[in-house]
Amino acid sequence: MKFTDKVVIVTGGGSGIGRACAIEFAAEGAQVVIADIDELAAGETVRFIASKQGQSVSIAADVSDPGSVQRLAEHSFDLFSRVDAVINNAAIQVNKTIEDTSFEEWNKQLSVNLGGIFLTSKYFLPLLRKSKGNIVNMSSVNGFFVEPICAGYCATKAGIIGLTKAMAIDHGRDGIRVNCICPGYIDAGLAEGYFMSQADPVQARKDAGALHALGRIGKATEVARVAVFLASNDASFVTGSSYVVDGGFGSGLPPK
């Protein structure tokens, strides 16, 4: 197993892609810290991992709150005395144009999606420096090109790509690698919330799938396996990269 005796932090690990990442890292032998503002969801992930004989704990954390993130780092170190990888996955999405987005909604997306990566990286970097560990940030294909009615979300995801490259340059000589993943539509998490908000969720999934060259939307596990690769020694010479996991999004047939 790739992560035996390793400790991995997953933010937003209570659901969606974060949950899939936590499960996959545990299956590879990692001791996983599931950080989530939703304690009940994080607890469900812990119980699922335990049912598969994996090891994990949950710690309540708000990635937009400096004090909460600092406590997360301290508690994680108190529990395991090391941290080997941080998966920055926590995010929110507001489906509005800039004109319709409130100041509070704009700031919230910035503070969770982009600020959360800043804070988590800031407080975990000293621990990662000791272990020669790495960071995997969750961006989106919307960091490269945008779709209608999600301006703030797209702005934060583009920012994550730039921040990933900047951190990779700043901390490469410390032995720390930093990469990001840019998923297309995934049948979990934020995309699931979008589908369920539509008048016909089933048709919305079909329409989204048709936009991908593979003719379907992705699975959270398919993103999680890339996270495992990037955080493992298999990717030992990969840093500052943005891995697109989108099934050829934008290359498929438009919905009828």
Image: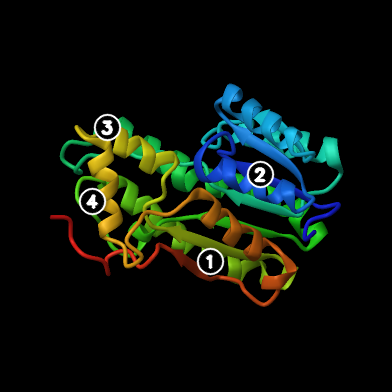
Which amino acid does the dot numbered 3 rest on?
Answer: Ser
Mark 4, residue position = 207
Instruction: Look at discs 3 and 4 and give the one toward the viewer.
Output: 4
Mark 2, residue position = 23
Mark 3, residue position = 197
Q: Earlier in the sequence, mark 3 or mark 2?
A: 2
**Other residues around mark 2 within 10 Å, as few (<14) / some (14–19) / many (≥20):** many
Residue 127 rendering spot, x and y as whole percentages: 77, 51
Residue 131 rendering spot, x and y as whole percentages: 81, 59
Q: Report, in whole angstroms, how far the alpha carbon at label 4 lies from the one at label 1.
A: 36 Å
Q: Report, in whole angstroms, how far the alpha carbon at label 3 lies from the one at label 2.
A: 27 Å
Q: Report, in whole angstroms, how far the alpha carbon at label 3 lies from the one at label 4.
A: 14 Å
Q: Earlier in the sequence, mark 1 or mark 2?
A: 2
Mark 1, residue position = 166
Which amino acid does the dot numbered 2 rest on?
Answer: Ile
Q: Is residue 157 left or right of residue 19?
A: left
